[in-house]
Image (cartoon, rainbow, N blue to C red):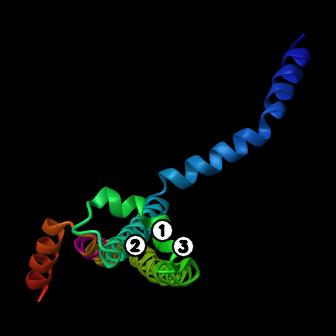
Amino acid sequence: MDKEIVHNVLEKMGETFNIKVVAGAVLGLVTNKYSILMVGFGVLLYIDILTKWIAISYAYLVEQGHENPAFFDAFKGINSARKARKINSYEMRKRSVSKLFVYIICFLMAAIFDLMSSASGANSQIVQIVCGYLAMNEILSIIENLGDAGVQSMGRLYELLKRRGK
């Protein structure tokens, strides 16, 4: 009787083994602080690209004679700007992928330094410094793009942050 129960349990575990492996890997990635930081950079890069497209679309709409287009109009106009070849997806994708690789290299360098420091008994926070700096650069880029897309308050915020940074 006990053998049968064990056999049934093992059989049930084997039926969903692939799902458990994938779920475990995803859970491991999601809960790892370094993975969360990398996903955060990916999201910031995506928002940066999107706001850049909106800014280009805004400029295209102004060029087409629209006077002070609304932000949502600029968002909806992305497709028209792409058709007019104002947005070059290949070039933007190439720049974004390059930027992501640079971020990964900087992040890995900082993570290795933190691990080495931790192994020697020191408490380094290089990952926080590097990630904070890189994230702030992305946030400034997003704010600048929003300002270029006609969101006047973002233009003022960008100028204020730029003055504070000097």
Residue 43 lies in what quarter of the image?
Answer: bottom left
Q: Is residue 81 magenta?
A: no
The Cα–Cα distance between marks 2 and 3, rounded to whole angstroms, is: 52 Å
Residue extending farthest to the bottom is 166
Horizontal side, residue 47 vs residue 102: left or right: left
Q: Which numbered mark, 1 or 2, is in the foreground of this view?
A: 1
Q: Secondary structure at mark 3?
A: helix
Q: Residue at x 79, y 30 (%)?
A: 13
Q: Is residue 143 magenta?
A: yes
Q: Secondary structure at mark 1?
A: helix
Mark number for residue 83? 3
Residue toward you, 146 or 76? 76
Residue stretch in magenta: 142-147
Residue 145 lies in what quarter of the image?
Answer: bottom left
Q: Position of residue 67 (x, y in %)?
A: 23, 69
Mark number for residue 118? 2
Q: Position of residue 148 (x, y in %)?
A: 26, 75
Would residue 125 be seen by someone viewing this image from the given angle?
no
The crowd level at tag 3 (other Cα within 10 Å; few <14, some 14-19, many 20+) is: few
Q: Which numbered mark, 2 or 3, is in the foreground of this view?
A: 3
- Whether pointer 1 and pointer 2 mark residues with C-beta atoms closer than 8 Å, the reply is no
Q: Which residue is mark 1?
A: 80
Give the number of marks: 3
Residue toward you, 97 or 86? 86
